Every structure is written in structure tokens, then in C-alpha cells.
Amino acid sequence: MNELSPARVCGKLSTMSDKPDLSLEADDLSGDPMVQFRRWYEDAESDGIHLVNAIALATADAQGRPAVRHVLLRGFDDRGFVFYTNLESRKARHLAENPSAAFALLWKELDQQVCVTGSVERTTDAESDAYFDSRPREARIGAWASRQSEVLSSRDVLMSRFIEIDARYPGDDVPRPPFWGGYRIVPDTVEFWQARAFRLHDRFRYSLDEDEASGWRVERLSP
């Protein structure tokens, strides 16, 4: 898994900034949206974009009432996009009721965004353990201390939990809480958006289509 594109430069400047007006054409695209995503992601990473993996994640409950929040994308490969969270949080409750999600990722400095929709599945215990063990010790302690999305009477309560867990696991061997793990968004659409002058943006959407040799249909969308 990649743990965490090319666009052609045109001569005309964007009305939104002094950057060149970058185009995105069908010939620029890979037939596989995950390959295309990796190209853009690695380009953004090499450009030093701050929080290159920050995504706005949308979920909805059984009645279709939505909620959105920013989380960090922690991995992606040909199976989909992975993030981790408290399994008793609001987003986790939503996903238990309605295992679908969407996210948008904006790289403002590049005038690019990626929008994804798909079904959601849990990562394996082995995947969750491996990622949890890679986190700094304090972050692992924090995962135990936070009862995410529950009402908190004061910050002192939270810090008391942190101190308690810190004392319980004095060394570096902090196990993954049973209420913490990962989710994988298995995409059914992936859209790549490149800003253009005069709001005449380039948009291409990949949609699952078993009739296509690649398994994906690629269409240009009106901006």
C-alpha cells in the first residue's frame, strides 16, 4: 500500500492567480483512477503541499442526514482509500448504519481537487494493528483517552484519562484499543478537477463499468 499527472502548461494566465493555466486532457489520464490518483498525490507531495493527505469526509446516518469532517488519508492502493478512527465515533455510527461515504481532497496551491464516492468496509485487524503501532506513543495513548464524539464535561476529564492510560502503559508497548480501527472506501466514482481560467475547469469522472476493458468509464464533465 502506498502510505502515504501530468497536466500540460498553457501560455494563458489564470484570472484567479498569477500561476499558469493548467489543462487536463483525456490523453493525460491513466485508464485506472488509482494510478491517476497516485500520480497527482505524488506530484502534490513533491511540491511540499501542507497536509497533502487531508480529506473532507462525508457520511450519512440511516435517515440520510449527512455530516462532514476533515480526517487524514492514511493509505491507498488498488483496493481503495484508508482512514482510521474511533469505532464508537459519530462517523463510525454512520458507517454502521449506512456503509457509504464520499470525500473531497483539495490542493489549493495546485488548483486541483479529487472527489471520491464509494462503499465502505473495515480494514483487517492486522492492517489496523500495523498502522496503530506506527503512530507516536502519545498519539496511541490519546486514542485510548478520547471517547470520540461523546459529550465531555471539561478538558480536565480528558487529560485525567490521558494520565491514567499513560501510567497503565509506561513503555512503548501500547496496544491498539478494541474500539479503534480503520475503514477503506472502495470507490465507485473518482473525479479529477483541474481549475482553469474563467471558471472553465477541466473535470473528468471515472465510474465503475463492467463493459469497459479497464473496468472504468471515463467522461469529461461540464464545469
Image: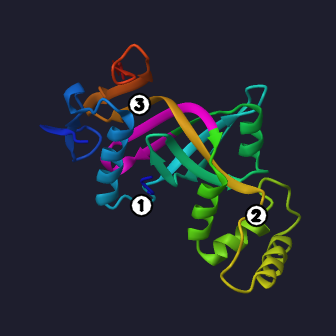
Give the dominant element type of the magenta stretch: helix, strand or loop.
Answer: strand
> Are there few (<14), some (14-19), or many (20+) residues within 10 Å of tag 2?
some
Q: Look at label 1 and name its amino acid.
A: His
Q: Residues within 10 Å of mark 3 (few under 14, many from 20)?
A: many
Mark sitting earlier along the chain (2/1):
1
Residue that badge 3 annotates: 191
Q: Quick check: 127 left or right of 215?
A: right
The residue at the far right in this view is 153
Label 3: which secondary element: strand
Determine which residue is flagged by label 2.
Answer: 177
Q: Residue at x 46, y 59 (%)?
A: 51
At a point 64% along the width and 50% down the height, the residue shown is: 124
User: Where 88 sits versus 97, above or below?
Assistant: below
In the rendered structure, does residue 54 fall within the stretch colored magenta?
A: no
Amino acid type of the residue that numbered disc 2 sits on in the rendered structure: Pro
**Residue 191 to residue 176: above or below:** above
Question: Which residue, given by chain and number where applicable, does mark 1 sit on?
Answer: 50
Q: CA distance from mark 1 to mark 3?
A: 22 Å
Residue 114, how many percent across, how many down? 42, 38
- Residue contact at pointers 2 and 3, CB within 8 angstroms: no
The CA distance from mark 2 to mark 3 is 35 Å
| In the displayed structure image, the side of residue 169 where residue 186 appears, left or right | left
- Residue 64 quadrant: top right
On screen, 124 above or below 203? below
- Magenta span: 104-120
